Amino acid sequence: MAKPNYSFEKRQRDLAKKAKKEEKRLRKAGAPANPDGTENPEPAAVPPEAEVKTVP
């Protein structure tokens, strides 16, 4: 049986990681943070007063 070439596997993983990182960087740089220009497009839901528990 042939020996596994770990150097080749590591190089391929590194190249894939580098390509993914570059793609993510380009996606972040090219797209605006919020397309409609609002600060927070989906505000967090405020819990009703009955569910808010205070600790004395």
Image (tube, rainbow, N blue to C red):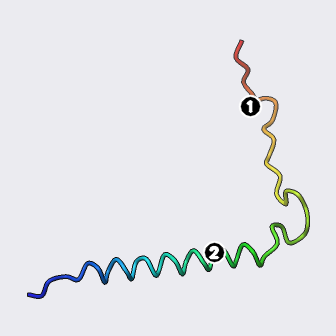
Query: Up-down: is 43 above or below 4?
Result: above
The quarter of the picture where the C terminus appears is top right
At x 39%, y 83%, the residue is: 12
Tag 2's secondary structure? helix
Which residue is nearer to you in this view: 5 or 55? 5
Query: Up-down: is 1 above or below 39?
Result: below
Which residue is under mark 2? Answer: 24
Which residue is nearer to you in this view: 52 or 28? 28
- Residue at the bottom extreme of this rendering: 2
Which x, y percent locates residue 10? 34, 77
Which x, y percent locates residue 51? 74, 31
Q: Is residue 5 left or right of residue 56?
A: left
Tag 1's secondary structure? helix
Name which of mark 1 and mark 2 comes first in the sequence. 2
Query: Up-down: is 53 above or below 17?
Result: above
Which x, y percent locates residue 27? 70, 77
Which residue is nearer to you in this view: 20 or 38? 20
Query: Up-down: is 46 above or below 34?
Result: above
Which residue is nearer to you in this view: 40 or 48? 40
* Mark in front: 1 vs 2: 2
Name the amino acid type tagged 2.
Lys
Q: Is residue 8 left or right of residue 54?
A: left
Which x, y percent locates residue 19? 54, 81
At x 8%, y 87%, the residue is: 1
State the CA–CA distance, disc 1 to disc 2: 40 Å
Name the amino acid type tagged 1.
Glu
Which residue is under mark 1? Answer: 51
Q: Which quarter of the picture shows residue 35?
A: bottom right
